[in-house]
Every structure is written in structure tokens, then in C-alpha cells.
Image (cartoon, rainbow, N blue to C red):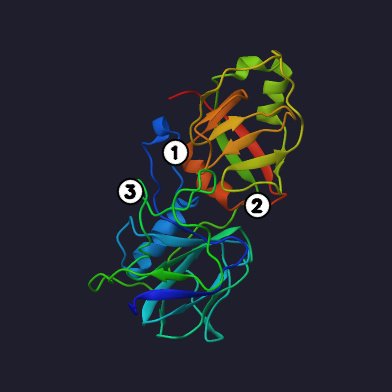
Amino acid sequence: MTDRALFVVRAGALTTVQDRGRPGHAHLGVPRSGALDGPAAALANRLVGNRPEAAVLETTLNGCALRPRSTVTVAVTGAPCPVTVEGRPASWGGPVRVPAGALLTVGTALSGVRSYVAVSGGIIVEPVLGSRSTDLLSGLGPPPLTDGAILPLGTPAALHTRVDTAPQPAPPTELVLRVTLGPRDDWFTPEAVRAFTTHAFRVSSASNRIGLRTDGPALERRLEGELPSEGMVLGAVQVPPDGRPVVFLADHPTTGGYPVIGVVREPDLPAAAQAVPGTPVRFLAVRRR
């Protein structure tokens, strides 16, 4: 049994293995998946000297607790949270040495939703279609962590440039999402399109890795009836029968039958990953590039 492994003492509400995802398989019905807050995951890998494609852990709200079998370097980024090693405070947003057998605790997010835990060498669960990411919609990749699980680790890279900490954007107090209207904005009344881009919405507690759901004014359709199933892209804003927009995130379906009123610019989506329920949301209409 290898000593390059993590023992999961506490899995938390939802902790998954994520990397940069598996793009390019939509024609097979496979979503992209991957870390919802890509920049935070990438920073965590840099802080411990991993390659950019190394797999990390994505926690949700209340963190996790881990015990490495060998001494490792760990970095926690994303949603700010308390980090301890054997009960002693450790750095958030910087590299932390965790001795073999010591308990690393990633606590409850102080703000934001998702924290990222990178471990030197990366997590080397079996890849599926070129990625180690957990996909909650399709079930591909490793299952979400459970208490008692064991995660194998890779070999750490050679010595790398180290920093004590690194700047990160704060979780949003207001989420502003730039959106290009279409392709089915003509299925809605002019008043509904205007409301979509001028009224305030809020992040719904029903949001998850598949989509950021919103509460707010219901968008009224101009056209009724069924829409044939169409391809969906990352950031598509689909409007189900209740009229409340849903922004598709990493584990989104590849096809859907409800009209898409617009598509959010991809650089705005990491902030959506950190928006807690109740956060105000504004959709800002921008022209097609």
C-alpha cells in the first residue's frame, strides 16, 4: 500500500475531485465538468508546485478534514476559510506543510461557497475521458468524497518558486454577469427581455454545480409550445416554465428543450461559483463579438 495518499476523515457537505475538465465531448453527451472556480483551482496548484492539469479537491460550504500518509504541501484557495493542522492555525491562500499523519482541517467558508485544496503531487484517481473530474450530472469520474475514502497522490514536482500568500478576488457581494442575448430571446416578450437585463435577481438556494438558479421576476414568453431539444453551452441562460433564469455551469446538460435567452461570458462564471444564496444578480447585455 502506497504512503502517497490522503485519508478522508470528514468529507463535508459536498467535496469532489476536479481538474480542468473534459471539454470536447459534447457530441457524446458529456459535459465539460471541472472546477467551477478555475482560477482558484489553478492558483492552488501553482502554490504547491503542481502542473496546471493536476486534480484538486473542491469543497462546498463546510470544508473537509484530511490526513496524509506522508508529508505533503497543501494550499487552500477559493472561498476564504479557517485552515488548521492538528488544531493549530495555518495559512489560507499559501503553501502549508502537513506532516505525515497530521490532521488537516479545511473549515466552513467565511464568505463564498467553494474552496480548493491542492496537494503536492496532485490527486491521481483513475481518469475518465482524459479527466479526473467528478461530474454530478452524468456520474462520470470518481464519486463525491465519503468519510473513510482513500485518495492516491502523485509524485511531487521538483523544487519550485514559493510565496507566502497570493492575492485572490473576494467572493461577490453582487454578481454582474455579462450576457449576449440569443439565440432564443425572440421567444420572450420585449418586456421580459428588458426585465432580464435591467431588473435584479438573486442567487437561489437550489443552485448547484449544474446551474446557478435565480429568484426574481418571472420572464414571460411571447411564444408558447415546445422547443425541439438544442445543444447547450457553458454559460447558457435557460428559462424553464417558471420563468426564472438558470445559468448553466460546469456540469450542465449538453442539450435542452427550454429557450435560451442569452449566454454569459465565460470569464464571469468563476464569480458565479462563489455567489452564496441571496447574492444579488444582474445580467448586463453586451454585443456579440
Query: Which residue has dot 2 on it?
Result: 173
Evaluate if marks 3 and 2 touch, with contact meaning CB atoms under 8 Å apart.
no
Comparing labels 3 and 2, the label whose residue is closer to the camera: 3
Asked if 56 appears above or below 206 in the picture, the reply is below
Residue 273 x/y as whole percent: 56, 50
Q: Amino acid at mark 3?
A: Gly
10 Å neighbourhood of mark 1: few (<14), some, or many (≥20)? many
Question: 174 or 85, which is in the foreground?
Answer: 85
Q: Amino acid at mark 1?
A: Val
- Which amino acid, by three-letter code, is at mark 2? Thr
In the rendered image, is residue 95 in sight? no
Residue beneath the point at 49% across and 70% down: 149
Residue located beneath label 1 in the image? 30
Gap between marks 3 and 2 measured at Cα: 36 Å
Question: In front of the other: label 2 or label 1?
Answer: 1
Q: Quadrant of the C terminus?
A: top left
Instruction: Indicate the position of residue 279 as horizontal and vertical percent values.
Output: 69, 49
- Would residue 244 be found to the left or right of residue 267 on screen? right
- Quarter where residue 226 is shown: top right
Location of residue 88 with respect to 209 vertically, above or below: below
Q: Is residue 138 visible?
A: yes
Local secondary structure at mark 3:
loop
Dot 3 surroundings within 10 Å: few (below 14), some, or many (20 or more)? Answer: few
Mark 3 = which residue?
130
Instruction: State the residue at coordinates (47%, 76%).
Output: 7
Q: Secondary structure at mark 2?
A: loop
Nearer the N terminus, badge 3 or badge 1? Answer: 1
Identify whether 157 is placed above or below 228. Answer: below
- Tell me what residue is drawn at x 38 percent, y 61 percent: 125
**What is the CA distance from the residue labelled 2 to the residue labelled 1?**
32 Å
Q: Position of residue 22 (x, y in %)?
A: 38, 44
